[in-house]
């Protein structure tokens, strides 16, 4: 691992690199210095991913502002279903 790893290009690239680092560290075969470097890089990638997710969440909130509302079943729809049920009983 280089001393100054470049920032990831995308969230997906950061996540893939983070998973690779985690797998390597879980094997327990890295020397201590490499383990510390991997841990540092993993922390950087984790921060990158958290920021990317927060940005995406904010974008979704902007897009949905005023659009999402609590769901309440329309009484007209349920009445229609009851009418249909009543029609089959009457037949």
Image: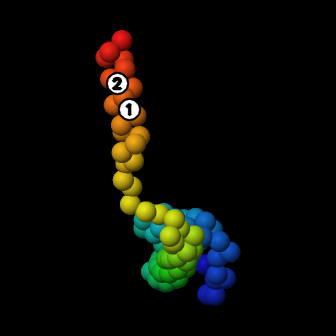
Looking at this view, is 54 or 86 the one in front? 86
Q: Quadrant of the C terminus?
A: top left
- Tell me if 87 is positioned left or right of 2 in this view: left
Left/right placement of residue 78 relative to residue 25 reads left
Say which residue label 2 marks.
Answer: 85
Q: Name the disc covering residue 81, or none.
A: 1
Given residues 18 and 59, the one toward you in this image is: 59
Question: Which of the 4 quarters of the picture holds residue 20?
Answer: bottom right
Residue 64 rendering spot, x and y as whole percentages: 53, 68
- Tags 1 and 2 in contact by the CB under 8 Å rule? yes
Check residue 17 in the rendering and tell me which mark sits there, or answer none. Answer: none
Q: Quadrant of the N terminus?
A: bottom right
- Residue at 43% across, 63% down: 69
**Residue 21, x across and y down, in percent:** 52, 69
Helix or strand or loop: what does disc 2 sit on?
helix
Q: Is residue 77 above or below residue 22?
A: above
Q: Examine the rendered structure and indicate whether residue 70 appears above or below residue 35.
A: above
Residue 18, visible in the rendered structure: no
């Amino acid at each position: 691992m280089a001393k100054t790893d470049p920032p990831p290009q995308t969230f997906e690239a950061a996540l893939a690199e983070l998973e690779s680092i985690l797998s390597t560290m879980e094997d327990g075969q890295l020397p201590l210095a490499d383990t510390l470097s991997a841990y540092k890089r993993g922390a950087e990638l984790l921060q990158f991913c958290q920021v990317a997710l927060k940005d995406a969440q904010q974008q979704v909130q902007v897009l949905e502002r005023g659009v999402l509302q609590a769901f309440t079943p329309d009484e007209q729809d349920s009445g229609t279903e009851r009418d249909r049920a009543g029609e089959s009983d009457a037949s």
